[in-house]
Amino acid sequence: MSLLRLAWRYLWSQPLTAGLNLLLLSLGLAAICFVLLVSEQIEQGVRRDLAGIDLVVGAKGSPMQIMLAGVFHLDVPTGNIPLSSLATLRAHPLVAQALPLSVGDSLQGFRIVGSTVDYLTHYQARFASGQAWSGPMQAVLGAEVAARTGLKPGQTFHGSHGLGAQGAEHAEQGYQVVGVLNSSGGVLDRLVITDLASVWLQHETHHGRAAGEPESDHEPEPEREITMALLKFRSPLAAVSLPRWVNAQPGLQAASPALETARLMRMVGAGSEVLRGFGLVLLLAAACSVFVTLLHSVRARQSDLAMLRMLGAPPWRVALLVSLEALCLAGMATLLGLALGHGLTAALGALLAEQQSLHIIGSWVSPWEALIPVLALGLALLAAAWPARAAFSLDVTELLQAPR
């Protein structure tokens, strides 16, 4: 019988103890794997969605809220700003580009965002079918929106007032789908993008005269508004002076994505550190349990080990037999831990997809996952070191002479 088969049988001779050790090791490795996969995807998603956006300008309020609402579309905007502010921002010598955004409506929980075609160009959007809009009340769907709603180019839909799924429907005018974007894993996947004029037309119709109603000679022209603007700097000097200049303007608030994202990642990182620490505690507990189990096994199987020595097995083979038990356990725990970590990541991704939130997938592969088997095997060998030494130094003559 090979040493590996014998070690496997020894390992499962006490199935309850082996199962408990396997569970502890697997849970610890799964927690570390889960943190790696989720944190990497969040960091990459943040970098991708923030690429080329140096400043977000919105109504007075929380800079974090403005950044989350304007870049990631995960929060409620702080309000609207006059359209004239966009021209002021574009005229500033330190501003290279200013992309307007207007939000306030949704489609089955997915946000309808009014902007210009430059917004699609900024994110290098590619079309799976159709094309960009050429006029008001035409819309381009993100890949996730199209998949969840089943809408295709040529079909129409009505938006709902508000950013939730339960808002009152704008029944006056509908949008026509003219394009569907390829999946990019970014924020565009969960947006409905249309022209700025579409948003103005919807809300002027909703709050003012009804569709088809003749325009009064004495009706004042409504003041155009946008929700926020995404700015790109012309030079690094703008990072110092432009936010102060924006905050000095009436009703405007600047949010620096670099600063706010750093704050956000510190808050997210605290939870990641807690979960990673929990995984390490589980691994430490598992290593201690494996150590106690193997040491007890060596003492309980002294007669068996002595028989192996009598049959010609050198001391190192007996020590290797004990180490193989721990390595078999670590190998199984690695496979289960990786599978469980990816499964938990997929479950979190499905939950976030239901909430039209961040894009996280369970099939993500991190290069740092290669360290998980190394960690498991290292812990197993560390736990088996003392029991293996005890098996190596067994005195066969003393054992055979001991009274039974």
Image: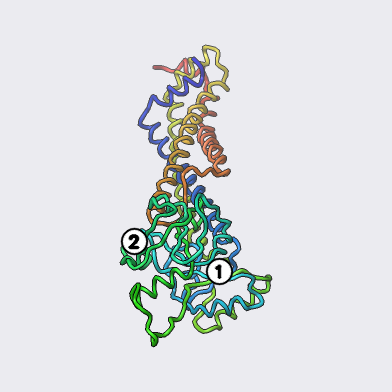
Vertical comparison of 288 with 274: above or below: above
Vertical comparison of 78 with 144: above or below: below
Residue 400 location (% of width, % of height): 47, 15
- Circle 2 crowding by C-alpha within 10 Å: few under 14, some 14–19, many from 20: some
- Amino acid type of the residue that numbered disc 2 sits on in the rendered structure: Ala
Q: Would residue 324 be found to the left or right of residue 19 on screen?
A: right
Q: Secondary structure at mark 2?
A: loop
**Residue drawn at (38%, 63%) of the image:** 174
**Residue drawn at (40%, 55%) of the image:** 155
Most foreground residue, 79 or 106: 106
Residues under labels 2 and 1: Cα distance?
26 Å
Disc assigned to residue 99: 1
Residue 153 location (% of width, % of height): 44, 53
Residue extending furthest toward the top: 311
Most foreground residue, 403 or 168: 168
Disc assigned to residue 165: 2
